[in-house]
Image: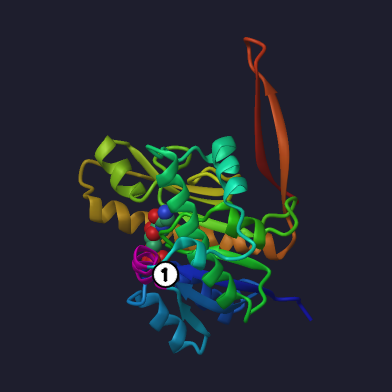
Amino acid sequence: MVHKIRVGVLISGGGSNLQAIIDASKSKEIDARVVFVGSDNPDAYGLKRAQQHGIPTFVVDYQTIKKETSVRSLEDLVPKDFELQTCLQQNDQGLSLPFSDRIKAERYFCTRAIFEAALLREMAAGPFDLLVLAGFMRMLTPYFIDRVNTDPSQPRIMNIHPALLPSFPGVDGYGDTYRYGCKVGGCTVHFVDYGEDTGPIIGQKAFEITHDDTIDTVRDKGLKLEWQLYLECIRFFAAGRLRVVPRTYTLENGAEFRRKIVEIAT
Ligand code: GAR
C-alpha cells in the first residue's frame, strides 16, 4: 500500500489552492490526505470548502489576539517557551524586518508568539508530515517555524507565492507584477524560512502578460498555474524527492554567494 503523507493546510481566504489539493488527494493524483485546515480569519471561505469534505477545521483569529494584547500584559500571554531575545537575534541575522524601534519589534514578536502558540496547540490535534500555506497571509516567525521544522535539514512548511520570486515578495504579487509592466508573470512554491518569501525555491511556473490583460486576467492566469504547481511540489515531497542543499558560488570579483537551494532527486 502507498504511504499517504498527512498534509495540514493554513489559509486566510477563498481557498482555491486548498480545493485543488483536496480534489487531487481524493482522486489520488497526489499521495496525500488533508488532516486539518486552519485559518487566522473566521470568515475564510476555504473553511467551508474543508467542512464540505469532512476535514477538521480551526480558527485562531489574529485580530482577537491583537485586541487581547492591547488590554492585557504581554508577559501574561506569551507562551512559557518563548525567548524574545533569541527571536530578536534571529531577526537581526536573517529577517531584518524594518522596525523603527526595539519596542515595536518586541511587541511584534510577542504578539506573533501568542498567535503562533495558539496555532500550534490547534495543530497538535492532527499530526502532519507537511504543512502547506495556501493563501495564508501572515508571516510566520522563528518561534513557529522552529517548532514545525524539528529537523532543520528537512524543512516541511511550503508556501505558494503569486510572483516569480525573488521578484515581488509581499502581499500582492500579481498586482505588483502587473503594475510594474512585466511581460511575464508567474507563481513560486518554496520552503518557508525566516524571511519574507525568501526560502529555497521548489518550483515555478510562468505565463505571458499581453496588452489585453487586466489585473483580473493576470490573477486568473496565475491561479490556474498555482493549482498545478502546488500539486507537483506536494507530489515531489510525498515521494521523498526534495533535498535542501547549501551552494556556494564564487563571483567574478572573488566574493562568495551562498544560498540554500532545492534539488529534486530523479
Ligand atoms: C494565491 O494567489 C496565493 O498565491 C496568494 O494568495 C492567493 C490565495 O488564493 N498567497 C499569497 O499572496 C501569500 N503571500 P486561494 O485562497 O484561492 O488559494
Residue 57, percent across and down?
Answer: 49, 82
Q: Is residue 171 highlighted in magenta?
A: no
Q: Is there any visible trace of residue 117 in the rendered image?
A: yes
Q: Is residue 112 above or below residue 243?
A: below
Secondary structure mostly seen in the magenta stretch: helix
Q: Nearer the viewer, residue 147 or 20?
A: 147
For the image, the number of numbered tags is 1
Residue 125: quadrant of the picture? bottom right
Q: Is residue 140 left or right of residue 174?
A: right
Q: Is residue 150 left or right of residue 28?
A: right
Residue 104, percent across and down?
Answer: 40, 46
Q: Is residue 259 above or below residue 149?
A: above
Q: Residue at x 43, y 58 (%)?
A: 138
Q: Nearer the viewer, residue 230 or 141?
A: 141
Query: Which region shows up in magenta?
Result: 61-71
Which image quarter is the N terminus in? Answer: bottom right
Residue annotated with mark 1:
40
Q: Is residue 65 highlighted in magenta?
A: yes
Q: Residue at x 46, y 61 (%)?
A: 74
Q: Is residue 234 left or right of residue 98?
A: right
Q: Residues within 10 Å of mark 1 (few under 14, many from 20)?
A: many
Residue 81, percent across and down?
Answer: 64, 62
Q: Is residue 251 above or below residue 220?
A: above
Residue 124: quadrant of the picture? bottom right
- Residue furthest to the right in view is 1
Residue 177, percent across and down?
Answer: 32, 41
Query: Ligand 1 is in which quadrant of the figure?
Result: bottom left
> Is ligand 1 within 8 Å of the beta carbon of the residue shown at mark 1?
no
Q: Residue at x 30, y 51 (%)?
A: 218
Q: Secondary structure at mark 1?
A: loop
Please, what is the three-letter code of the amino acid marked with disc 1? Answer: Asp
Q: Is there any visible trace of residue 201 in the rendered image?
A: no
